[in-house]
Image (spheres, grey):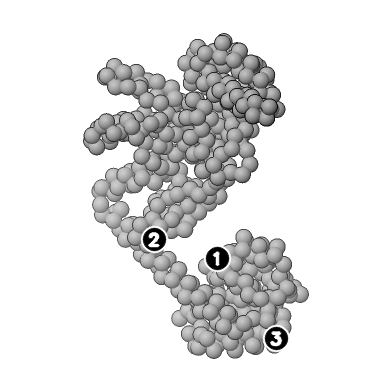
């Protein structure tokens, strides 16, 4: 019959005796306490216990030991027995050592020497309880998998269920979590990955929806979203979630896929609007924001309900950039993070222009944004390309505080391309700044 064994590791026998006595006092005979006088001794002991089929809920290790540092020992223990909880008990571990243990061994707790008895007892009690709960949950998950396997064999409709499940949690998300199927996904599964985030939203949807019945609202949303989805899938992305009329999509291959998807969405929107106009409805506009950065993908929730989610400042920035499309009067904006990934300097594949550095809500530093105008109507796109040098010179003067010179150049841009909303926006800003300066001078005089 397997036993549950707690291992204490230290190169000082007096410490080991004291530690073992206190653990006996708090745990009684429920667990067997074993000691090891160093890292190599501990690894040999663990190998023997695993071979005998015993469980190791907890290992408590010193840091400074002659043969092996504590963080290295716990890392190797994690590779051998990942479910074993690790506690470092020492007065000499550096912050770097503790960080290594947290990162590579999933350190459960750090306790300084000399330890407080109550602190040690509470930590050990919580650790073995946590291990027990995790074990129960793992057994329940294993049982669920067994039940599902039986159902797969017994039910002809299992394939339909699987296909329906994929529509709620994308296969790509499951794959990123290194799981073979949705059934294997467990609460707390997570992975860190650099991806591009596309965030899109319908302009003034609230006003639009107020004039529709609930049924018409759903028909409209589904009609719109069904046209946008292929643009994302065809460019190696997947939809993480729908937020009402908004779409959040992820792209893990390269930033170009995300930009290509955004351009495709805008072109599909043109077709969608042509149909709306033929049917007597007003056309709609959307804004698209794209950012590239490190994301944490995983599952959150409880024992009866969990969901996939993405946690990252990169997602928030993509959403903030999308809102800027309304201010600048453009359809698509990307951040500098995404722009750098495109390598457009080597191969100018896209129609892109820098439109300045802006203050974004939630960010202390200014963010450089670029407009992608490939999907603009031909006359507007051509006008922006022709006035590109003039626009960039105007933007440079604006950034340098030369607002009068900038205003003249932005005005020239508008003369050549009257529908350039960004140039119009900047011209208004310049005029407003110049007006304030004039008023200030008059007040001074």
Task: Please say if the residues under marks 2 and 1 sit with CB atoms less than 8 Å apart.
Answer: no
Label 2, label 1: how many angstroms apart (C-alpha)? 22 Å
Image location of residue 54, percent across then percent down:
51, 77
User: Closer to the N terminus: mark 1 or mark 3?
Assistant: 3
Q: Which residue is mark 3?
A: 13
Q: Is residue 64 above or below residue 363?
A: below
Which element is circle 3 on?
helix
Front residue of this view, candidates 282 and 157: 282
Count of numbered badges drawn on the protein: 3
> How many C-alpha atoms fall within 10 Å of the one at disc 3: few (<14), some, or many (≥20)?
few
Residue depicted at x 34% and y 35% = 206
Q: On residue 302, which mark appears?
A: 2
Q: On residue 311, which mark appears?
A: none
> How many C-alpha atoms fall within 10 Å of the one at disc 2: few (<14), some, or many (≥20)?
few
Q: Is residue 355 above or below residue 250?
A: above
Note whether residue 422 is visible.
no
Residue depicted at x 37% and y 25% = 284
Q: Is residue 73 left or right of residue 134?
A: right
Q: On residue 82, which mark appears?
A: 1
Residue depicted at x 76% and y 75% = 66
> How many C-alpha atoms fall within 10 Å of the one at disc 1: few (<14), some, or many (≥20)?
some
User: Closer to the N terminus: mark 2 or mark 1?
Assistant: 1
Which element is circle 1 on?
loop
User: In the orientation shown, which residue stands out farthest toward the right?
Assistant: 66
Note whether residue 429 is visible.
yes
């Amino acid at each position: 019959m397997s036993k549950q064994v707690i291992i204490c590791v230290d190169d000082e026998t007096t410490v080991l005796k004291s530690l073992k006595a206190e653990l006996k006092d708090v745990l009684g005979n429920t667990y067997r306490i074993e000691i090891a006088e160093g890292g190599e001794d501990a690894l040999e002991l663990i190998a023997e216990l695993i071979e005998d089929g015993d469980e190791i809920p907890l290992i408590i290790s010193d840091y400074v030991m002659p043969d092996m540092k504590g963080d290295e020992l716990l890392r190797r223990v994690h590779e051998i027995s990942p479910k074993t909880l690790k506690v470092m008990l020492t007065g000499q571990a550096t912050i770097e050592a503790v960080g290594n243990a947290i990162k590579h061994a999933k350190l459960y707790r750090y306790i300084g020497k000399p330890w407080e008895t109550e602190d040690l007892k509470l930590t050990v009690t919580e650790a073995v309880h946590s291990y027990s709960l995790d074990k129960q949950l793992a057994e329940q998950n294993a049982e669920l998998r067994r039940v599902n396997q039986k159902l797969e064999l017994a039910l002809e409709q299992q394939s339909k269920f699987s296909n329906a499940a994929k529509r709620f949690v994308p296969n790509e998300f499951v794959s990123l979590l290194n799981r073979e199927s949705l059934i294997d996904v467990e609460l707390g599964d997570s992975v860190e990955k650099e991806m591009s985030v596309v965030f899109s939203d319908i302009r003034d949807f609230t006003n639009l929806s107020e004039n529709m019945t609930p049924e018409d609202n759903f028909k409209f949303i589904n009609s719109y979203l069904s046209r946008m989805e292929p643009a994302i899938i065809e460019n190696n992305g997947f939809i993480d979630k729908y937020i009402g009329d908004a779409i959040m999509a992820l792209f893990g291959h390269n930033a170009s896929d995300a930009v290509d998807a955004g351009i495709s969405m805008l072109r599909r929107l043109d077709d969608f609007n042509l149909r709306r106009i033929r049917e007597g409805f007003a056309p709609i506009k959307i804004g698209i924001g794209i950012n590239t950065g490190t994301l944490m993908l995983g599952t959150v929730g409880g024992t009866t309900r969990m969901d996939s989610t993405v946690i990252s400042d990169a997602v928030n920035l993509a959403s903030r950039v999308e809102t800027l499309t309304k201010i600048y009067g453009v359809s698509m904006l990307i951040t500098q993070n995404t722009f750098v990934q495109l390598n457009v300097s080597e191969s100018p594949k896209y129609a892109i222009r820098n439109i300045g550095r802006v203050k974004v809500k939630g960010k202390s530093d200014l963010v450089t944004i670029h407009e992608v105008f490939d999907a603009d109507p031909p006359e507007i796109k051509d006008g922006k390309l022709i006035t590109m040098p003039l626009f960039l010179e105007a933007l440079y003067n604006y950034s340098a505080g030369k607002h009068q010179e900038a205003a003249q150049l932005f005005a020239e841009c508008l003369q050549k391309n009257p529908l350039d909303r960004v140039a119009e926006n900047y011209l208004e800003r310049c005029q407003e700044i110049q007006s304030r300066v004039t008023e200030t001078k008059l007040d001074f005089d």
